[in-house]
């Protein structure tokens, strides 16, 4: 994020820094609250228009459940089997707005119903992007590039920019393309039957395609983590299980806490349902179930309560 110092400003939100505890050196994630901000309603209106466009992107992955469906429908076409992830470094703070607005124009022009003209929507987007002021350490700043992590349209705006760049890249790339390429905002996952050299060439070209977008990546012949899913190569397809980040302490509600019983029941049920959805009908299913059960037993839940939650989750 690039910002310039202001002497005064009519209204400035405070900027907060949320540490990314799961990443090396715990880098900060800058978040500016847009609640009650002058452009709040404009941003919300634009987001309602952008969301359907985001969902139409070829690589779009909505959430974990959608990702599970994508993985279960995939099959390798050849003998080579590789899976990989690529993540964009600090996406929200490096988006060049001029090119991002070109991307918005591209997608706005694809709408079948253009009740509001593309030019009007672009002007509204410019207001959200250029009228963001915030305060930090008693100084006032105006953001002059990228998008605020905190404004309503932020995720959709970032999604469409990366989708626009991906569309341009795949139209120009002449090498071997992955058979599977999905993306949750800035987290991408792919699978291919190409050789390791061909995959390395693909990722190198992706990483050098745009100077503002830099990637970290991982390639595996066995398994890889994507969101909260562990994706593994299984025969000619992919299998899934639950992925816990190293920072996950599994600090669920203690059984002794004076919370309503339905709150603790919901906490148990959702975790067991996750295990069922991610790994059911695989050899590791019993092991994952026992591991999840032990998390709650360590928090003081009786065996009978944990066993009931397990049975209910399998019935859903």
Image: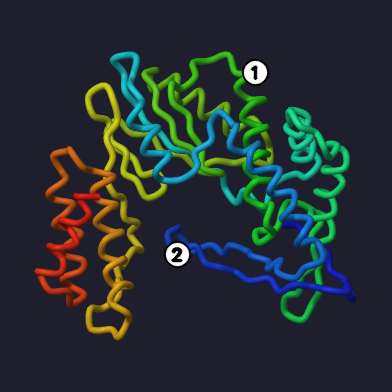
**Residue 104 placed where, x, y %?**
75, 37
* Mark carried by residue 21: 2
Closer to us: 130 or 303:
303
Q: Nearer the viewer, residue 137 or 151?
A: 151
Tell me where residue 41 sits by quadrant.
Answer: bottom right
The location of residue 295, given as percent across then percent down, is 21, 66
206 is higher (above) or lower (below) than 68: above
- Kindly state the secondary structure of the residue where label 2 is placed: loop
* Quarter of the figure with the N terminus: bottom right
Dot 1 corresponds to which residue?
172
Q: Are there few (<14), some (14-19), or many (20+) residues within 10 Å of tag 2?
A: few
Marks 2 and 1 sit apart, C-alpha to C-alpha, by: 37 Å
Q: Nearer the viewer, residue 209 or 268?
A: 268
**What residue is shown at x 87% (from left), y 46% (from top)?**
123
**Label 2 with label 1: CB-CB less than 8 Å:** no
Judge whether 148 appears above or below 249 on screen: above
Q: Is 299 above or below relative to 89?
A: below
The vertical placement of 34 against 276, above or below, is below
Kindly identify the residue that appears in the image at 29 percent across and 49 percent down.
242
Please report whichever mark, 2 or 1, sits nearer to the chain's N-terminal start.
2
Q: Identify the residue shown where x is 50% and y is 42%.
A: 62
Coloring applied to the structure = rainbow
């Amino acid at each position: 994020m690039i910002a310039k110092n202001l002497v005064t400003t009519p209204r400035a939100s405070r900027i907060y820094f949320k540490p990314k505890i799961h990443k090396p050196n715990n880098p900060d994630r800058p978040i500016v609250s847009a609640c009650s901000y002058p452009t709040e309603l404009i941003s919300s209106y634009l987001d309602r228009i952008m969301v359907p466009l985001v969902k139409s992107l070829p690589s779009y992955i909505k959430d974990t459940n959608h990702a599970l469906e994508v993985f279960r429908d995939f099959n390798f076409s050849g003998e080579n089997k590789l899976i990989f992830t690529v993540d964009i470094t600090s996406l929200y703070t490096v988006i060049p707005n001029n090119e991002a607005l070109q991307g918005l124009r591209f997608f706005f022009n694809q709408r079948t119903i253009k009740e509001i003209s593309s030019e009007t929507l672009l002007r509204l987007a410019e207001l959200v992007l250029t009228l963001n002021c915030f305060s930090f350490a008693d100084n006032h700043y105006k953001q002059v590039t990228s998008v605020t992590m905190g404004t309503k349209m932020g995720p959709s705006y970032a999604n469409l920019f990366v989708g626009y760049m991906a569309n341009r890249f795949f139209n120009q790339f002449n090498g071997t393309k992955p058979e599977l390429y999905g993306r949750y905002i800035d987290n991408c996952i792919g699978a291919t039957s190409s050789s390791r050299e061909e995959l390395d060439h693909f990722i190198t070209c992706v990483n050098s395609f745009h100077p503002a977008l830099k990637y970290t990546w991982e390639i595996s012949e066995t398994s890889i983590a994507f969101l909260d899913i562990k994706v593994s190569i299984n025969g000619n397809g992919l299998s899934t299980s639950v992925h816990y980040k190293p920072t996950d302490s599994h600090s669920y509600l203690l059984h002794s806490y004076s919370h309503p019983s339905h709150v603790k029941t919901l906490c148990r049920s959702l975790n067991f349902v996750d295990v069922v959805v991610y790994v059911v009908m695989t050899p590791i299913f019993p092991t994952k179930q026992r591991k999840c059960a032990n998390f709650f037993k360590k928090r003081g839940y009786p065996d009978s309560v944990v066993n009931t939650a397990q049975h209910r989750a399998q019935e859903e």
